[in-house]
Image (cartoon, rainbow, N blue to C red):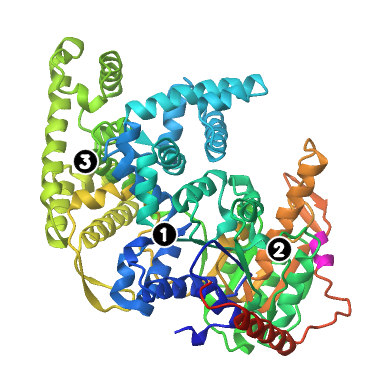
């Protein structure tokens, strides 16, 4: 099975005991290493149920699951392959009672959190509440609760936000709800405070594999440490040169700490790139060269020199967009890659997309903007998810408020305000207050009747969902529910046009079918082959709804040109890439004038890694473009090429490393190592 792996990959796969760090350069086959290591562990007798592979996206988890199934068949189905957040949910569902959580707690999305913070802070200003949200999220990712945040606050603004955080935490507890940051922080607290639970999970997991390790934050690292314990049986796979998420809490300190916390750590470098040509990799190696190295490495390729990387100077943004479109049209005529999906235009910030969209539309070229609105961010889907969340947790007040008013049923804001005041005094959730004996004294009889009718509908649906097993039963229930609440009529009443209403209703039908399919039965896999799947109840599926980010995790990309920010492009690749807007002030982004020298240097290092990521998305050709003038507000200002263009050293004579010599040296090194120590040591 390992014959298809290179020597470094084999070394990583065969190291089965103790801690292991695999430094996987861009395009070096990290997913292949992880899936083959899962297979190797199973072949050596490790029960699949005792292996966990943790990723950062549902899409990556689905791909890993599919590839592992191709190697070891059904046994891969027992391996826990999931995101950090899904693992946190599993921990809390099983053992969260030790923290006072019911098994059916609710998971609030970003909009719910924003609404709750507005309520806690008695403000209607979304910008202020969003700033609170970012600050609190940062504290949670650093492992701080409200008390700890207050203790280390250095300004009046931070002290006020920490006090708000305390009220927010109280509301979450009262509503039996958690936010996404809690899905990491609460499991860590659980393992820190409960030795019995810690021993249970350490005994359950014989080996833990962590993908994209460089993207972990401080809390995720501590969670991993608790799960693997002193035995340290884990494989961390990552690349310090691709650490580009410092703004959301990811820290390279996690890489620095590994050798200190696990002195027996084995470090293996994957430097052979299977994606890009020599010219592209040389530009990438040159760009990343000035950054300080935790574990030095240099990518090489056996794919040949390829076309030179081209730098294009443009007059302004519209000219840059036209040049990018002309490049795509030209390559389609001369290249072997002629599908639109073979091309991508990458840029630093979302606002840069507009001018490229306009140019592509003029040329009648189909495209998609990566990172657009998620299916589950659409209003009609969030409406329905509010009902599902209430099936799971009737104490979820944000879900209650959305469900009881969508579609409208004659329950107005005044009634809900009175109900909220009554529930707060009685220390009840809004749903729990519906059946309190004294509710009739606080609200008019007609309002009480409408609210209790809603409660009866919800209880009936929850009962049926608990017993709706399999796809057909789930679909029948969902159809009955949508008809009972007249949701299609609601869409027509609230949409701007019949066409918009029809499109929204089509989304609802897709959602219905997707929910039903997840309840099991005969399901088609990615290749269209029907396979049996364990039936689940509709209530079981509803419990996972807050973690789902895409309608179909294995959906094939449509045949369109991709427009994407560099952050959203990480992990992807295309034969032909245009890296646009490579100007000072954009890439690297404008420096924070108030930041100290050390902070500014760290920022430039991360921006350089972002440039490196952009370069290494390209397989065969790469164009880097910049503009002499750019629009800033209402003004047109002179612009300069990014310092990173010079750092690519495209116009300098470069000693080109012969990949055959590199491979020869590696073979000699591994032969010597194999002779000195047994496999699996």
**Residue 134, how many percent across, how many down?**
56, 36
Q: Secondary structure at mark 3?
A: helix
Magenta stretch prevailing secondary structure? helix
**Residue 274 in view of the camera:** no
Left or right of 523 on screen, residue 590: right
**Residue 248, how many percent across, how many down?**
58, 46
Q: Is 23 rendered above or below residue 334?
A: above
- Which stretch is magenta? 641-647
Where the N terminus falls, by quadrant?
Answer: bottom left
Q: Secondary structure at mark 2?
A: loop
Q: Is 666 rendered above or below residue 393?
A: below
Q: Residue shown at 26%/79% (left/top)?
A: 529
Q: Which mark is residue 295?
A: 2
Of badges 3 and 2, nearer the viewer stands 2
The residue identified by callout 1 is: 58
Q: What is the crowding at mark 3: few (fewer than 14 residues within 10 Å), some, or many (at least 20)? A: many
Q: Indicate which disc, 2 or 1, sits on the residue closer to the N terminus.
A: 1
Q: Is 198 rendered above or below residue 43?
A: above
Q: How many marks?
A: 3
């Amino acid at each position: 099975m390992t014959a298809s792996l290179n020597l470094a990959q084999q070394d990583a796969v065969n190291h089965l005991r103790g801690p292991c760090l695999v430094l996987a350069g861009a395009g070096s086959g990290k997913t292949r290493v992880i899936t083959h290591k899962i297979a190797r562990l199973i072949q050596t007798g490790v029960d699949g149920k005792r292996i966990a592979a943790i990723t950062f996206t549902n899409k990556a988890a689905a791909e890993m699951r599919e590839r592992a199934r191709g190697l070891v068949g059904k046994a891969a189905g027992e391996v826990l392959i999931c995101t950090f957040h899904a693992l946190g949910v599993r921990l809390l569902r099983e053992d969260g009672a030790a923290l006072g959580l019911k098994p059916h707690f609710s998971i609030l999305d970003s909009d719910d959190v924003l609404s709750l913070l507005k309520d806690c802070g008695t403000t209607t200003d979304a910008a202020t509440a969003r700033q609170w949200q970012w600050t609190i999220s940062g504290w949670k990712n650093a492992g701080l609760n409200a008390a700890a945040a207050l203790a280390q606050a250095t300004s009046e603004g931070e002290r006020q936000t920490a006090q708000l955080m305390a009220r927010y935490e109280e509301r979450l507890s009262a509503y039996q709800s958690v936010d996404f940051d809690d899905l990491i922080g609460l499991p860590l607290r659980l393992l820190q405070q409960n030795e019995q639970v810690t021993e249970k999970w350490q005994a359950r997991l014989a080996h833990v594999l962590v993908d994209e390790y460089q993207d972990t934050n401080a809390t995720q690292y501590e969670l991993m440490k608790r799960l693997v314990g002193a035995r340290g049986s884990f494989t961390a796979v990552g690349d310090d040169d691709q650490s580009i998420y410092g703004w959301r809490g990811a820290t390279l300190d996690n890489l620095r700490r590994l050798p200190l916390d696990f002195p027996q750590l084995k470090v293996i470098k994957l430097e052979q790139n299977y994606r890009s040509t020599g010219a592209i990799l040389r530009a990438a190696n040159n760009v990343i060269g000035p950054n300080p190295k935790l574990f030095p490495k240099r990518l090489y390729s056996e794919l040949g020199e390829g076309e030179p990387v081209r730098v294009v100077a443009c007059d302004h943004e519209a000219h840059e967009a036209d040049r990018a479109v002309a490049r795509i049209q030209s390559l389609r005529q001369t290249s072997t890659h002629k599908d639109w999906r073979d091309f991508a235009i990458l840029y630093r910030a979302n606002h840069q997309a507009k001018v490229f969209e306009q140019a592509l539309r003029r040329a009648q070229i189909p495209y998609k903007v990566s990172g657009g609105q998620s299916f589950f961010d659409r209003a009609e889907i969030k409406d329905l998810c509010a009902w599902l969340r209430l099936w799971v947790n009737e104490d979820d007040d944000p879900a209650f408020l959305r469900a009881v008013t969508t579609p409208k049923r004659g329950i107005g804001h005044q009634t809900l305000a009175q109900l909220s005041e009554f529930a707060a005094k009685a220390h009840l959730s809004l749903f729990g207050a519906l059946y309190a004996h004294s509710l009739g004294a606080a609200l008019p009889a007609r309002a009480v009747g409408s609210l209790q009718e809603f409660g009866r509908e919800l209880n009936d649906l929850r009962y049926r969902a608990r017993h709706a097993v399999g796809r057909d039963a789930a679909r029948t229930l969902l159809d009955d529910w949508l008809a009972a609440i007249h949701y299609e009529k609601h869409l027509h009443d609230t949409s701007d046009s019949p066409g918009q209403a029809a499109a929204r209703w089509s989304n609802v039908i897709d959602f219905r079918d997707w929910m039903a399919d997840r309840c099991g039965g005969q399901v088609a896999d990615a290749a269209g082959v029907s396979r049996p799947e364990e039936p689940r109840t509709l209530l079981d599926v509803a419990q996972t709804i807050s973690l789902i980010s895409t309608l179909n995790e294995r959906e094939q990309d449509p045949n369109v040109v991709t427009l994407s920010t560099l952050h959203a492009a990480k992990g992807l690749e295309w034969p032909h890439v245009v890296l646009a807007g490579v100007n000072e002030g954009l890439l690297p982004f404008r420096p924070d004038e108030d930041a100290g020298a050390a902070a500014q240097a760290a920022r430039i290092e991360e921006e350089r890694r972002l440039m490196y990521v952009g370069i290494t998305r390209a397989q065969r050709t790469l164009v880097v473009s910049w503009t002499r003038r750019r629009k800033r507000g209402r003004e047109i200002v002179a612009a300069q090429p990014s310092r990173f263009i010079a750092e690519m050293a495209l116009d300098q004579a470069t000693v080109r490393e012969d990949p055959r010599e590199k491979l020869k040296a590696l073979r000699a090194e591994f032969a010597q190592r194999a002779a000195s120590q047994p496999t699996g040591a």
